[in-house]
Image (tube, rainbow, N blue to C red):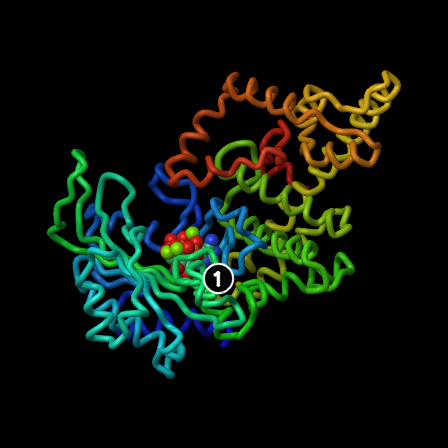
Amino acid sequence: MKASEIRAKWLQFFEEKGHKIEPSASLVPHNDPSLLWINAGMAPLKSYFDGRVIPENPRIANSQKCIRTNDIENVGKTRRHHTFFEMMGNFSIGDYFKEEVITWAWEFLTDKKWIGFDPERLSVTVYPEDEEAFRFWNEKIGLPAERIYKLEENFWDIGEGPCGPCTEIFYDRGDKYGDLTDPECWPGGENERFLEVWNLVFSQFNHNKDGSYTPLPSKNIDTGAGLERFASILQDVDSNFDTDLFRPIIDRTCEIAGVTYKTNEEQDIALKVIADHVRTVVFSVGDGVMPSNEGRGYIIRRLLRRAVRYGKKLGVDRPFLYELTSVVGDVMGVYYSEVVEKREFIERVIRTEEERFHETLSDGLSMLSEIVTSAQSAGSSEIQGVDAFRLYDTYGFPFDLTEDFAAEHNMTVDRAGFDAEMELQRERGRGGRRETESMKVQGGPLSDYTDKSEFVGYTDPITESQIK
Ligand code: ATP
Ligand code: MG
Ligand code: MG
Ligand code: MG
């Protein structure tokens, strides 16, 4: 089943259950300074959940583009994580609750008319104190107790405000993916034998200022299911990256780089990272985010530069990411017409940014050659931290490239010295505070994103008029 069919089925199923279908909102939150990116299907509907706005229909469904930069380190390593992905959701604003949502989820997943998963392959997790959810799964759906795992983490709480337990649905991908005698293979464990496909959140309490919890007068349902994960199961492929959502991008990158997918693990990681990041960049630029040194633009710049560097690992030394824009459009255009309509603009933005980064890298390289020559003539085999930092700080030259270059000349780099300079830089503040604060409220993901070897030069944000 193609990903576009899965999405269409989702929307049709919930429409038949009386839901109003909302189009995907922009990745840039509207009127919500607490969030850097839309990171869940519920995020653009928040004003319904907190009661500020009364929806026309209390039942809503969508398929929402999302960005989660906190998953960046997982990209290319796990089978299931992306920085940009699509979350399908159904929502009840004070209307239906646990029983209906569980019943419908099961129907959608197992009925042949819809997804048609083998029911034997499904397991769930519940919050240990949520006996109601346990009972619905066990008695109403008939799921054996041993396939209902109790997990303490199954409580959705972001501090003050509505919160509640959740139940998550996992698909067992079989013995090939891990041995059941290993608890890490059980739902919620590190292993991906059980793939989390859907999270149903029962928002039934209010987390009060004093830390106590009281039942909410109007209970809500918020669910989220990853389209790419459904596709990986239904297309019977090894990872999300092998689905029709990613393969065309990976294949095109292979053509550009002259490499073959699935012949070398390191290379595959690079191909996956590039495919992931390019989707994130294409969609954000499509939603009006321009690469810059602040906020969202900064994230985009870093992702793009990270993709360029992974491209270098594949031997691609020229701008190429922009060429993938049209492939993203071919794949996603059926539902997201913006990536097709704005293709030329997006290509220009990406190309300009890639060119700039290549220039930065070559300036950095000539600077580095001088540093190496003078260190060697002084009889040293180490590049000083302060020099590595200057390269990083002034030329946007990533630390690990300095290290690679040093290694090629039988030299090392003083990492401790570099870190110390970095720390001093942080203390100086340099006006980055606002950005860090806004990153923190996204639940820490961006402040967790501390890949120090990445960098962003001090170039000014690109303005539209500068795009060639
Ligand atoms: P995981 O444990 O696999 O990281 P999660 O518990 O963080 O997932 P939720 O916050 O429950 O995910 O989001 C709801 C659904 O969205 C998940 O069940 C999954 O199908 C999908 N999803 C979440 N994060 C990602 C991601 N980074 N890439 C792709 N799909 C995702
Ligand atoms: Mg996660
Ligand atoms: Mg999870
Ligand atoms: Mg989850």
Q: Is mark 1 within 8 Å of ligand 1?
A: no
Residue sitting nearer the eye, 83 or 452: 452
Residue under the image location 26 percent in, 47 percent down: 47
Q: Quadrant of residue 298?
A: top right
Q: Is residue 370 above or below residue 95?
A: above
* Residue 291 appearing in the image: yes
The image shows residue 198 at horizontal and vertical percentages of 36, 63
Secondary-structure class at tag 1: loop
Most foreground residue, 289 or 92 = 92
Is any part of residue 25 visible from this angle? no
Q: Nearer the viewer, residue 234 or 330?
A: 234
Q: Which kind of residue does numbered mark 1 sit on?
A: Glu
Q: Which residue is mark 1?
A: 192
Quadrant holding the C terminus: top right
Q: Residue at x 51, y 69 (%)?
A: 232
Residue at the left extreme?
A: 217
